[in-house]
Image: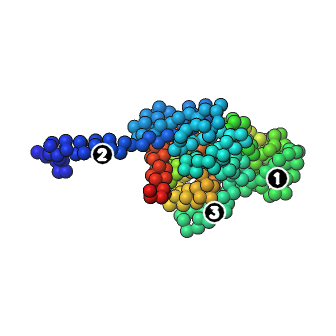
C-alpha cells in the first residue's frame, strides 16, 4: 500500500537524480560569517550545536584575526562583532564603507547608544505604542556624574521616589558594569561611586520578561528578578545593598510555580510592535529588552534594560533562529542586487 503523496520508486530515483544534477549545476554558496568576539562571548555564543547546524545549512564561522587589518581578511558575507574600543570601531566603520555589500552586525554608532544607561532607553521614551494591548514606559531616572556627596540633595530635588536601583552608567562588558545596588534611603547613596544612573525601582512581583530579538524574530522568556519592596519595609530599612545578577541565570522562571497574574507573558502584538519600532529606531538587529509588569496591573510595562548582542546561548532554539536569520540576510542581499 502506498501512503497518499508517496512516489513510485522509479519516480523517486528520477527526482533524486534531478535534484542532484541541479545542485551540481548550482552548487550552494557557502555563507561566510567573520566573527570578532571576546573569549567569554565566543564560549557562550559559538556553541558546538550552533556550529554544527550552521555547517549543515552552509554557514561557516571564521574567526577574524585581530592582529591583522580587517580589510585584508575575508571575503565575508556577514561580520558579527562585539568588541569595544575606538580602534575596533574605526576598523569596522572603514570596513563597512569599503564593503557595503557585507552585513555588519551591527554598526558601531548604533551600538554606542546601548553602552550608556542614560541614552539606552531614550528610544523607548519616545515610542508611541497606544492601542497596542498595553503601555510601555521607562522608570524615572537621573544621572550622577560626580561628587557623590551631592546625591541626597539631587535625588530629593529631582523628586525621585525610593527605593532606587543604582546602576553603573557605562556598560562595557565588564563585571563591574553589571554591579547593581538597591538603595532604601537617599543618604546612603553617597557611599557609591559615580558615574551612576539612579532609577526608580518598580514593583513587579519578582518576574522579568527577557525579549530576545534576532532580526525579525522574537523570543520571550521569563526570568527571576528582585521581589517587591513593601511600604513597610521601605519605612524600616536604611542603606544601599548590592544585589547579584538575579535575572541572568539560564535557569528561567518558565517552569516555576508562579502567580499567573505576574507570570502572564506580555501580549505578543505589543512585543512585536515594540521590537519592530526599536529595531528601526536603534538601527540594530541583535539585542534584547528587559521588561517588567508593574505589580497590580495587567498591562503597564516598564523597559529597564536593553543589551546589545546579549547571551543568545541561553535563548531556547537559538541555533535555529540564528542560522535562519543569517540565511535571511543572504536572501535579502540577492533580492536587492540589480539583475545582471
Ligand atoms: N527599575 C527597576 N525596577 C525593578 N527592578 C529592577 C529595575 N532595574 C533593574 N532591576 C532588577 O535588577 C536587575 C539588573 O538590572 P539591569 O537589567 O539594568 O542590569 P544589567 O546588568 O544591565 O542586566 P543584564 O545582565 O541583562 O545586562 C534586573 O534584571 C531586575 O531584576
Ligand atoms: O542574555 P542576558 O540574560 O540578557 O545576559 C547577557 C547580558 O545582557 C549581556 O550584557 C552579556 O554580554 P556581555 O558580557 O558581552 O555584555 C551576556 O554575556 P554572555 O553572552 O557571555 O552570556 C549575558 O550575560
Ligand atoms: Mg538586564
Ligand atoms: Mg544590561
Question: According to the image, label 1 marks what residue?
Answer: 155
Q: CA distance from mark 3 to mark 1?
A: 26 Å
Q: Residue at x 51, y 44 (%)?
A: 77
**Secondary structure category for the residue under label 1:** helix
Q: Residue at x 43, y 34 (%)?
A: 52
Which comes sooner in the sequence, label 2 or label 3? 2
Q: Nearer the viewer, residue 317 or 186?
A: 317
State which quadrant residue 125 falls in.
bottom right
Which comes sooner in the sequence, label 1 or label 2? 2
Q: Nearer the viewer, residue 153 or 329?
A: 329
In the displayed structure, 129 sits above or below 160; it is below
**Secondary structure category for the residue under label 3:** loop
Question: According to the image, label 2 marks what residue?
Answer: 22
Circle nearer the viewer, 2 or 3 = 2
> Which of the image's four quarters has the C terminus?
bottom left
- Specify whether tag 2 is near ligand 2 (CB below 8 Å): no
Amino acid at each position: 500500500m502506498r501512503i497518499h503523496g508517496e512516489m513510485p520508486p522509479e519516480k523517486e530515483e528520477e527526482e533524486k537524480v534531478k535534484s542532484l544534477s541541479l545542485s551540481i549545476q548550482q552548487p550552494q554558496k557557502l555563507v561566510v560569517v567573520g566573527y570578532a568576539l571576546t573569549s567569554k562571548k565566543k564560549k557562550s555564543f559559538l556553541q558546538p550545536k550552533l556550529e554544527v547546524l550552521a555547517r549543515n545549512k552552509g554557514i561557516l564561522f571564521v574567526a577574524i584575526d585581530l592582529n591583522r587589518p580587517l580589510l585584508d581578511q575575508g571575503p565575508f558575507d556577514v561580520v558579527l562583532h562585539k568588541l569595544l574600543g575606538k580602534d575596533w570601531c574605526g576598523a569596522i566603520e572603514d570596513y563597512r564603507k569599503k564593503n557595503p555589500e557585507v552585513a555588519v552586525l551591527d554598526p558601531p554608532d548604533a551600538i554606542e547608544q546601548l553602552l550608556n544607561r542614560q541614552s539606552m532607553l531614550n528610544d523607548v521614551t519616545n515610542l508611541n505604542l497606544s492601542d497596542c494591548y498595553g503601555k510601555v514606559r521607562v522608570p524615572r531616572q537621573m544621572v550622577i556624574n560626580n561628587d557623590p556627596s551631592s546625591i541626597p540633595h539631587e535625588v530629593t530635588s529631582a523628586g525621585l521616589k525610593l527605593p532606587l536601583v543604582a546602576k553603573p552608567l557605562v556598560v562595557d562588558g565588564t563585571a563591574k558594569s553589571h554591579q547593581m545596588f538597591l538603595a532604601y534611603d537617599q543618604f546612603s547613596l553617597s557611599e557609591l561611586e559615580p558615574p551612576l544612573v539612579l532609577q526608580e525601582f518598580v514593583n513587579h512581583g519578582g518576574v522579568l520578561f527577557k525579549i530576545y530579538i534576532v532580526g525579525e524574530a522574537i523570543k520571550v522568556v521569563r526570568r527571576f528578578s528582585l521581589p517587591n519592596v513593601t511600604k513597610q519595609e521601605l519605612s524600616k530599612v536604611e542603606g544601599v545593598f548590592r544585589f547579584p545578577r538575579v535575572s541572568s541565570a539560564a535557569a528561567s522562571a518558565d517552569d516555576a510555580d508562579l502567580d499567573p497574574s505576574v507570570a502572564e507573558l506580555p501580549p505578543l502584538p505589543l512585543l512585536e510592535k515594540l521590537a519592530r519600532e526599536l529595531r528601526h529606531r536603534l538601527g540594530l538587529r541583535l539585542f534584547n529588552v528587559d521588561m517588567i509588569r508593574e505589580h497590580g496591573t495587567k498591562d503597564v510595562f516598564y523597559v529597564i534594560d536593553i543589551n546589545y548582542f546579549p547571551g543568545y546561548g541561553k535563548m531556547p532554539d537559538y541555533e535555529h533562529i540564528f542560522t535562519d536569520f543569517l540565511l535571511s540576510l543572504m536572501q535579502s542581499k540577492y533580492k536587492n542586487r540589480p539583475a545582471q
